[in-house]
Every structure is written in C-alpha cells, then in structure tokens.
Image (cartoon, rainbow, N blue to C red):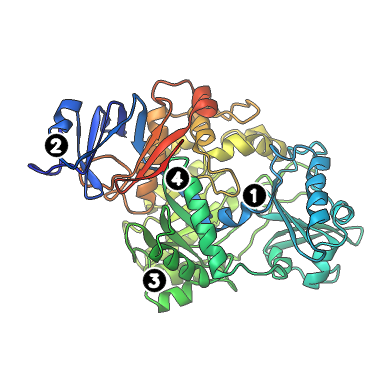
C-alpha cells in the first residue's frame, strides 16, 4: 500500500473497480481520500483498513477510474458564451443550406437589429467546399447583423448589416496581421486574424455577470466529461481585465467548477499584462483552484483556414504562406518584457515559420535572463521541424498541442497542404520520445471538449474520415492517459499538485463506463461515458 499517513481514517474510499493511478504507478483496486487529497492506494483489503465510522464508501461497480483529466488549452468563458450561439458544426450543419436555414429560423424569431452569432463551420467539410459568402448571409438575415465564425476562430464571415454597424467597407485600412477579403473590389464577408476585431467591436460586450454564468455553465459541462482542470488560453480576449474580476467572483461564489490556469492575453493593443503586473498577478500567483499561468501572444492563424504561417506556400494558385502577425522586433520585445517580469509564456504558433520565429524570441529572452525551468510553451506547435525540436530541447521550450486536431482537421490539412506536410503534423510520439512531456487539449470551442475523440486520435492517428495521419506517431492508451493527466499538470508547473493518484496529490478523479486499458479504440470513441467526477475528494458530477 502506498500511503501518506498512518493511523488516519479516510473521509472517502473508492473500491471495487480498476483505478489507473498514473503511467508509472499502474492500477490499484481501491483508493482512500483524506481532506481532499489522496491518502493511500492499494488492494481493497489494505485500503478498507482505513475505514472509520464516518468514512463514505463509493462502490465503482467494476468501472474504470483515472486522475481527473486536464484540458491544457481551451477558452472557458468562450465555451460558456457560445453555448447560446447557433451550432454551425458539421454535425449540425453539414450543408450550406442547413447552415443558412438555422440563420433564417433565428432571424424569424429575433427582434430586427439583434446579432445572430454562429460558430463551427469548416469549409473543407461543407457540401459546397468553400466559405459561405456575405450575400448568402444577407439573404438569410437581411435585418440582422450576422457573425459566422469558422471552427478555428481565426476566420469569420460577416453580412452587410454587420459591416455597416462596424463602419467597415471596401476602403477600410486592413490592420497588420489581418485580412478583409475582397473579390473584384467587393467585400466577400470573410475577415481573418487581427482584422476581426474591427467588426466584433460592434457586438455588445459580455457583462461580468454573463461571463460568470459562462464560467459556471462551461465548467459544469467539462466535469461531465471527467475534466477537472483547464487552461483558459486567452484571458482578456472577450472582456479585457474584467475577465480577471469575473473569475475571482466566480471562485468566491462557488461558481468555478474546474481548476483553472489563466493565460493572459499579451497581444499589442489588447494586452492585459500591464494591468495584471501592476496588480501583482504574475505566473504562479493564486491557489490550486485559480492560478495565474502564462502570457499568450498570437503569431499566426490556423492551418485549416490557410492562415497559419508556413515557410512554403499552401496548395493553390494564390501563393499564400498564411498570416504573419508580428515582426521579429515586435515579438522579441513583447517576449522579453514578459519574460523579464517573471512570466511563463504560452504563445500561439502553428506553422513552421511561426514556430521558428517564436523559438528565436524565446532563445534571446532566455539568453538575457536565464531560467532553466521557465517552461515557455508553444501552443499548438502543429508543423514543427526536427531542427526546431533540437533547439526547443536545448532551451527548455515545450510543445503544447491539441491531438484532437488530427481527428477533426487532419483531412483539411491534407487538402490545403498535401500529404507530405500534413500527415506528420502534431507528432506526439516524436515529442514524447524527445522528453517534451506534451499535454493535450481541445482548444474548445474550436473543437468539442469531449475527450474521447482526443484519446482516439492519440492511439490511432485516424481522422473522422479514417485517414491515418502517420501511424508512427501513435502512442499506447497508457501514454495517452499520461498526456491527458500528468503532462497537463507538468505544462502548468503543477505536477507535484495533481495529475496522478498518489498520496498527497489532490483527489481529482474521473470514473468511466469502459476500462480504457482494455477497450478497443472504437469503444473509447463511441461507447464510453464519464459516469462520476470527484474534485478535491467531493463528488461534483454524477451521471443519472
């Protein structure tokens, strides 16, 4: 029996199941909890010796338990807010007509002039194989401003009413690192990257109370999937510094369902880093429920949207290499400033050119202010090269990918980049073998936070269509679970707090309907559910 204390009586005991405690720890029959933390793991007989008069027994009924999952990159407030938007994902709107019908239906019931907001379309999965056009949104909702956001969040389609409200037309100057598409001198409706803010500013901003409601709703949904910890990947993106306020009020009022690691938006013009630094909110400040994490800067867009910055052009005749958002000088100044202030950085770079630019900025900052364990992260890091991996290893820089991108977007990558570049993207096994301890996440609402497609893609490297994206990058189910738990904690410098079910770590536990160690990948993907979630030893979700 592995135990943190002798003579103690457990508050709670879980037994009669398979409890996967961690990659190196293996499985146990039973687990004891005391004061919100793991007290001991072992055989049923050993653990039941810790039972006292007031000990609560939880019979797992033969089910499978793991440490609580850690979604190491998502947007918690955005998830909650978009729960009320139209669902434009391929599951709900596989055709352009079905997507437009949703917009028409909302336009028929919403007062004229109110915004219609939709998210989730992917032009590579739509029956027409292209982005919707402004004129099509105009026909569906002539009296309402419409914003239709691509699944990646880096591209949006707006209708004429939206452009009018924002005061944007064909003559509007395009901001650096942005795109306002025109064809034959006329707006198509497509707006990408930094230019989206020009039109989005016309949408009423979420109130503090709406953001608290969003945190609560999204967090409870995540608990229903066994996710107990998250990283919010761009705090300030929706409500500026007020998001910090919303998170703290939510926590104070018991409305923060998941442990949250806050990554502060550090982009020029929209950065909340100066206000946070002035308030003493630097990396590590907080507690195990709410902690200041890193600083986020966007370097490029998304591969599926053809805005990730690549060293070689995308397929097609326009010769585009994507969107480069910042000059080397701008990026290096921003990185140096945050690094010198003591912040960890977790910057968005998907294309190999953006990844190279970010590595160089990190290297320069670390040369001026050395820190052997700052753990600067490259968020996504989808198309990194072997040469870049060696530089990352030398500098202590870590990839923080979303393996579900392989499942959801792998075929889109092939369509815009070709097989040679696409199949080897997000090379999980390579990263693991190099010792990078890569976490995983959903980037939700980019992808659904449901963890089962994420796990499925790690063990099979298959897309939703069945395309195998370089089978050499497959990992075992134990390795996949390690990525979702222990490595998620490592990415947040919290590997001594959570991520494994060992004495002294928090008793965050997810219980699933199938034993993932023995289940077929298809059973994990299609038939597995989370049935019980504990956070800090307390039951916070139970499936009826």
Q: Quadrant of residue 419?
A: top right
Reading the chain from its start, which is encountered first: label 3 or label 2? 2
User: Is 362 located above or below residue 463 in the figure?
Assistant: below
Q: Position of residue 90 (x, y in %)?
A: 70, 38
Residue in the image at 58% along x and 48% along y: 352
For mark 4, give the secondary structure: helix
Q: At 20% from the left edge and 40% from the top edge, which residue is drawn?
A: 55
Compared across the picture, whether 41 is left or right of 461 comes to left
Distance from Cα at disc 3 to Cα at disc 4: 27 Å
Say left or right for 490 vs 38: right
Circle 2 crowding by C-alpha within 10 Å: few under 14, some 14–19, many from 20? many
Residue 58, numbered label: none
User: Is disc 3 in contact with disc 2, using a CB cutoff of under 8 Å?
Assistant: no
The label shown at residue 50 is 2
Label 1 with label 4: CB-CB less than 8 Å: no
The answer to which of 518 and 176 lies nearer the viewer is: 518
- Foreground tag (2 vs 1): 2
Separation of residues labelled 2 and 1 (CA atoms)? 49 Å
The Cα–Cα distance between marks 4 and 2, rounded to whole angstroms, is 28 Å
Q: Residue at x 75, y 43 (%)?
A: 123
Q: Which residue is mark 1?
A: 152
Foreground: disc 1 or disc 4? 4
Q: Nearer the viewer, mark 3 or mark 2?
A: 2
The span from disc 1 to disc 4 (Cα, nearest Å) is 23 Å
**Residue at the disc numbered 4:** 223
Q: Kindly identify which numbered label has been placed on residue 281.
A: 3
Q: Earlier in the sequence, mark 1 or mark 3?
A: 1
Instruction: Report the Cα–Cα distance between label 1 and label 3.
Output: 29 Å
Badge 1 crowding class, 10 Å Cα cut-off, few under 14, some 14 to 19, many 20 or more, is: many
Res. 277 visible in picture: yes
């Amino acid at each position: 029996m592995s135990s943190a204390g002798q003579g103690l009586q457990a508050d709670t005991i879980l037994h009669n199941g398979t409890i996967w405690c961690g990659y190196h720890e293996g499985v146990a029959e039973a687990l004891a909890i005391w004061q919100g933390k793991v007290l001991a793991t072992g055989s049923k007989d050993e653990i039941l010796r810790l039972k006292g008069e007031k000990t609560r027994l939880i019979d797992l009924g033969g089910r499978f338990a793991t440490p609580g999952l850690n979604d190491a990159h998502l947007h918690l407030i955005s998830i909650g807010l978009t729960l009320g938007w139209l669902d434009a994902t391929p599951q709900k709107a596989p055709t352009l007509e079905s997507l437009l019908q949703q917009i028409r239906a909302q336009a028929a019931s919403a007062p004229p002039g109110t915004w219609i907001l939709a998210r989730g379309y992917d032009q590579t999965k739509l029956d027409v194989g292209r982005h919707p056009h402004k004129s099509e949104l105009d026909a569906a909702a002539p009296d309402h401003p419409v914003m239709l956001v691509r699944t990646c969040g880096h591209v949006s389609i707006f209708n004429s009413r939206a452009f009018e409200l924002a005061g944007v037309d064909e003559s509007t100057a395009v901001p650096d690192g942005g795109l306002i598409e025109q064809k034959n001198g006329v707006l198509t409706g497509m707006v990408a990257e930094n230019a989206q803010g020009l039109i989005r500013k016309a949408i009423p901003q979420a109130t503090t109370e709406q953001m608290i409601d969003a945190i609560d709703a999204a967090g409870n949904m995540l608990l229903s999937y066994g996710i107990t910890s998250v990283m919010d990947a761009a705090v300030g993106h929706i409500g500026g510094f007020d998001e910090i306020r919303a998170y703290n009020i939510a926590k104070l009022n018991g409305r923060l369902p998941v442990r949250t690691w806050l990554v502060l938006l550090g982009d020029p013009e929209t950065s909340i880093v100066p206000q946070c630094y002035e308030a003493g909110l630097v990396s590590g400040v907080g507690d195990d429920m709410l902690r200041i994490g890193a600083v986020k800067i966007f370097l490029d867009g998304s591969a599926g949207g053809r805005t990730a910055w690549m060293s070689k052009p995308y397929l097609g005749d326009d010769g585009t290499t994507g969107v480069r958002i910042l000059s080397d000088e701008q990026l290096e100044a921003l990185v140096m400033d945050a690094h010198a202030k003591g912040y960890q950085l977790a910057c968005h770079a998907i294309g190999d050119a953006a990844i190279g630019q970010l590595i160089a900025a990190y290297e320069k900052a670390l040369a001026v202010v050395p820190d052997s364990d700052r753990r600067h992260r490259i968020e996504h890091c989808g198309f990194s090269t072997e040469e870049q991996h060696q530089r990352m290893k030398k500098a202590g820089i870590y990839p923080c990918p979303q393996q579900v991108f392989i499942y959801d977007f792998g075929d889109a990558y092939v369509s815009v980049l070709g097989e040679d570049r696409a199949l080897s993207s997000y090379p999980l096994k390579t990263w693991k073998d190099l010792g990078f301890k890569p976490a995983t996440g959903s980037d939700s609402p980019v992808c659904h936070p449901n963890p089962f497609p994420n796990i499925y893609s790690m063990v099979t490297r298959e897309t939703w269509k069945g395309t195998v994206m370089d089978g050499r990058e497959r990992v075992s189910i134990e390795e996949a679970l390690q990525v979702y738990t222990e490595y998620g904690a490592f990415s947040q410098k919290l590997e001594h707090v959570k991520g494994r079910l060992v004495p002294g770590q928090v008793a965050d536990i997810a219980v699933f309907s199938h034993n993932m160690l023995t289940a077929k990948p298809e059973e994990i993907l299609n038939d597995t559910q989370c049935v019980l979630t504990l956070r800090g030893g307390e039951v916070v979700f139970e499936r009826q």
